[in-house]
Amino acid sequence: MIVSITHEHDLDGLGSQAIIKRYFNLNSEFHSVDFRGYFAHYNNFVEKIKSFSELKPLPSQLIISDIGFNEDFKDLFSIFQNMKEQGCKISWFDHHIVDESTKEKLRSLVHIYSNDTKKCAAEIIKLHYLPNDPITSKIAEFARDTDFSTNIYKLASDLQLIIGFNLGAQNDKNKQRIVELLSQGDFQNPWFNLQLENLKKWNEEESDFAINHAKFIPIKSFGKIIISWAKIGGGKITRLLKERFPEAKARIGIDTRHNEIIIHSDFINCRDFARTFTGGGHKERAGFKYPQIFEKDNVLNKSFIDDIKETIIKQI
């Protein structure tokens, strides 16, 4: 059994798994092997890895893609060690900023740990598994377009919307279908158009909700930050906020479906900010967690706001 687990939130995550799946589909050596694809976000990643370590039999390979390393992931070190000793080959492909000491620790525990912050995860995986395959190259190109916000391909933006619409375990079958279609190079499948029709109202309503609930927080000697929330991805919210309120020095989006929080800013180191809250990511964008974001419906907890202000002040 080969297990692939990837970040469920974006095209880079699902595109990475599609490339991995395509590699095993094309390789006759693995045609009789059971390939299983799973999806995770930062709040349930550790729990999912623990569940894989309890499988009987243990997977022959565990392939992790597009997942950075949060401080609370250190609980996985002993699990990786045990899986390795039992013969599980673990590979981890990523592009988030990770401390050198953590990278070295992971390299001692897994078969491959590949991290390149200048590429998206799908590009790293393409180079490792299928560097010359045209379909794989196109998947990686689409993934980079959304992950680095170059916005060249409408299809890439549409796929990102479809993935955001299908977050959550209840939509795993749809995410699996996305991975399958991408792995086949079936980028124009009519099912994608049907999904876009179904999500149009949802996207408009939740985008309007995020804009209408945006809350400005002034921070002395820094400027204003802006926070909003909705039942859409936190990254999508921060992009909406940037378009509508470009004067904000930092933007925070909260996906209330999973209480996942994304911060975007060109004025602070977002990864350092997120690490204060056991999060991580990139310099200009990162994700983090907070125990009680809201005091009540649509009212941010004062301690949440105060902690954000205090953390930003320490950085400026």
Image (spheres, grey):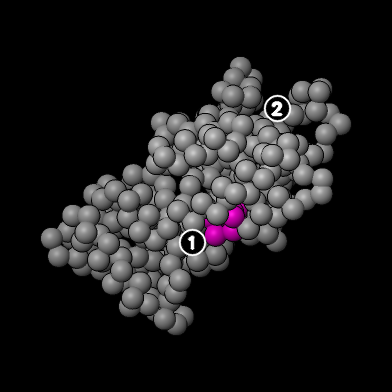
- Hey, which residue is sitting farthest top in the picture? 132
Q: Is residue 128 left or right of residue 316?
A: right
Disc 2 marks a residue whose amino acid type is: Tyr
In the image, is 207 to the left or to the right of 268?
A: right
- Pick the residue in front: 306 or 171: 306
Location of residue 271 in the rendering, given as x and y in whole percent from the top left corner:
36, 49
Residue extending furthest toward the right = 32
Q: Report the residue marked by disc 1.
A: 260
Q: Is residue 299 above or below residue 168?
A: below
Q: Residue furthest left?
A: 221
Could you tell me if residue 126 is visible in this image?
A: yes
Regarding mark 2 in the picture, which secondary structure is present there?
A: helix
Residue 24 image label: none
Question: Could one spot residue 186 in this view of the protein?
Answer: no
Q: Residue at x 54, y 60 (%)?
A: 43
Contact check, label 2 and label 1, Cβ < 8 Å: no
Image quarter of residue 247: bottom left
- Secondary structure type for disc 1: strand
Report, in whole angstroms, how far the alpha carbon at label 2 lies from the one at label 1: 32 Å
Write the residue at 32% across / 51% down: 272
Q: Which mark is residue 23?
A: 2
Q: Quadrant of residue 190?
A: top right
Q: Is residue 153 rendered magenta in the image?
A: no
Foreground residue among 233 and 209: 233
User: Residue at the location (79% across, 39% down)?
Assistant: 1
Residue reaching furthest bottom? 296
Range shown magenta: 40-46
Split into 4 quadrants, where in the image is the C terminus?
A: bottom left
Q: How many marks?
A: 2
The crowding category of the residue bearing disc 1, from other C-alpha atoms within 10 Å (few below 14, some 14 to 19, many at least 20), is many
Horizontal and vertical percent position of residue 181: 71, 38
